[in-house]
Image (cartoon, rainbow, N blue to C red):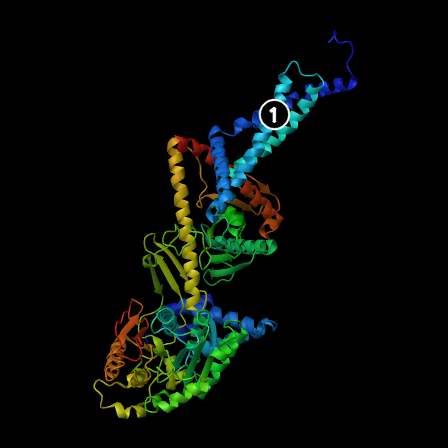
Amino acid sequence: MPRIPTRLIVEAYQHDALLPLLLRECRTLDSAKHELRWLREHALRVKSEATPHFSRTLLRTMCVARSKGIPLQYILGDQPFGDLDIKCTRGVLIPRQETETITYHAAKLILDKLSKDGGGGIDKNRPLRIIDLCTGTGCIPLLLHSLLSPHFPKITITGIDISTVAIGLARENRERNVRLGLLSKRALTDVNFQHGNVLEYADHTSALNKVFQDVRVPPSPHLDLGCDVIISNPPYISPQDYRNGTTSRSVRMFEPKLALVPPEESSTPLLGERNFQIEDLFYYHIAAIIAKCMVRLTVLECGSRLQAMRVATLCRNILQKRSETSGATISVWSVTGVDTHPYAVLIQMSLNNKGPCQGQQR
Amino acid sequence: MGSIPWVCSRCLARSARLVGNLQPIFQRRGLHTGSDLSPALLTRARSMAAEHAALSDQLATSFDPKIAKRMGEVSEVAKALMEWNDANKSIAELKSILNDPDAEAELKPLAVEELESTQASLTSISGNLKRALVPRHPFADLPCLVEIRPGAGGDEAGLFAFELLRMYLAFCARRGLRSSVIKRELGAGTDDRLSEAVLEIEVDGSYDVLRTESGVHRVQRVPATESKGRTHTSAVSVMVLPSFPENGVSGDGALNFDDPNSDYYIDPQDVRSEKMRASGAGGQHVNKTESAIRLTHIPTGIVVSMQDSRSQHANRKKAWQILRAKLAEARQEAREQDVVELRRGVLGGVARMGRGDKIRTYNYGQSRCTDHRSGITVHNLDDVLEGGDGLDTVMDSVRSWITDREILEMVSELPEKHK
């Protein structure tokens, strides 16, 4: 990381004595100024009746914490995600803007494809079923619910995570957003969060089946599992990238490794696969679930273009092993532009009564 | 008079008053009568009244919302024209009585009195007719955005911009207009110097209320930053932009910005959206708090950046709103400019007050606020800056000035159209 020029530090100090502290983490003056403003607003909000001295001390404490690299969202306690306000605590990954963009795109796809198409359309009595694997704060299920619930009379969204802290936080976020009026009351019954290990589901479908039994959704005759959409933002950082500086210090030190790097010990059965990379571990498992369950739409967030290409290839290989799923349309989606934009792999299947898929249109 | 044997005292008194009143009647007649309403304007009013009659016939047989809407637009003109015709007819009748040598002598004073009052009301009636003829501003029914930027004058301009922002906030609070600051950028290292602010007023029709405020506001005072007690002059530019409702104006084709045929449609292809953040790894690798969004409309080069909120989504929404407002205003302005150019070619010298012109001076030394368009001066600057009645007075005078000017423009415009 390049040093901050002294000139910049002096300039920051002239603006505000606290700015040089924030500069350590923000690196640019503009973003430091914004963070200072947000922190100040927060300090004034927290204790509006307290003395100005107290809020000054509070602000100073927060700036010192931030200078040590503690994420702003952990200090402020929340992060906006779409129209929602997501609470963030230590031990759970902070929702990223890339995820937000991908969630909006997924909602658009669901509205375009699933609500209108005639043959494989959802009948009125059956709810639309969505599963979010590795849900974390629960941001994706909650935002999807807020975007889709006006268009679907029945909808069931399940978020699954291995971390009990995350599941607790996700439930708290559900209640919090309903209380704030950002989500409709339906979300309390429509959105569920369950503890589960995604890496077990592919081998033991019974575990996944249990998920649906808990949601009390009757399994449909056409589908092995009652699921229309899978969306996921799984851990996708390789152990090398985690160590070599690609992952920023603040993320490494304060965000849970569990949510960032796939576990190396679980990857031994796959080591024989061609082109296997540890960071793709979750995608193999999710692809296996899709192949078994005939999911109509899958949206998988990826870290980079390269990874997205790899994931698209591995999904194609796995899905082609079964005749029912061999006709799936797999594409890499990104916002046009430079390399930092979000990348997602989209897998779409049109279900014509379980026969091999025909007539894919993108 | 000698041949008349006897005149009653009452009639004598009346005729004396008549002689005394003759002058004022004449004066008024010289200022405001039918001749004031130019023939072109009258033709237009008559054609609109005819249209109104035709439309009401159509409506009697079948209902069509479009026809009903158009009828609502012209009905005011038709009504005003009818009143105007009635007044003119009665004036003609009264005149004929006056000029008739056979009329009874007792009637004449009564007729004169009647004529006087009718002519007085004719003034206001023709005023109404003219106002009805002025087409309504296309954005009049919309909520608005007020953009405040300091101009020449450095720090002092920033300070005054902050005061203007406070003035409009107070004004909105007093008038019960719901308002919120959607963008507030302070100058370097200060908390009372604005570098840019956008105020959103969410009430329908607030564009019409505030459109008198577009332009350069000049301040003359001894600034807080001045050490030698000299008076400085600085400028702050205020722009009032129409704010389009998020899901468009349903049904109304002209203002529905989602409709590609609309005048205010923006092709998303023309807008470049940039997330102002450093390159490098993204996603889970980093946790950037930067949420700034910059939209560039490529054909016009208008740039809007928004970074106030921590949510990128919210920033993008606001940026689009401002971009849409700016483009709509620019397009409307271009259209007005075309009209002015055309008129200048034919008539020469029709002035137009653009947003680049100085419109108002706030002078602290003399505690006055002068508007340069209507020429009104209010000698209670504090009240104006607190958004009180003083500001109302100024704005009302400007509004009537704008109406007068629009009438004038219309009058000068009509003959060209009829050529």
Placement of the N terminus of chain A among the 4 image quadrants: bottom left
Left or right of residue B324, residue B281 in this image: left
Residue at the front extreme, as displayed: B61
Query: Circle 1 sits in a helix, a strand or a loop, which is it?
Result: helix
Residue at 75 percent across and 9 percent down: it is B4
Q: Position of residue B316 (x, y in %)?
A: 41, 64
Asked if A247 appears above or below B227 in the picture, the reply is: below
Q: Position of residue A345 (x, y in %)?
A: 30, 76
Q: Looking at the picture, which amino acid does disc 1 mark?
A: Ile
Q: Quadrant of residue B278?
A: bottom left
Placement of the C terminus of chain A among the 4 image quadrants: bottom left
Residue hosting label 1 = B91
Q: Position of residue A359 (x, y in %)?
A: 26, 71
Residue at the top extreme, as displayed: B3
- Any part of residue B231 in sight: no
Q: Position of residue B286 (x, y in %)?
A: 36, 77
Q: Residues within 10 Å of mark 1 (few under 14, many from 20)?
A: many
Kindly identify which chain the residue marked by label 1 belongs to: B
- Any part of residue A51 in sight: yes
Residue at the left extreme, as displayed: A274
Left or right of residue B330, residue A173 in this image: right
Residue in front for this viewpoint, B103 or A52: B103
Residue in front for this viewpoint, B333 or B381: B333
Residue at 43 percent across and 79 percent down: it is A157
Residue at 44 percent across and 78 percent down: it is A156
Asked if B109 appears above or below A282 in the picture, the reply is: above
Left or right of residue A233, residue B208 in this image: right
Residue at 64 percent across and 18 percent down: it is B98
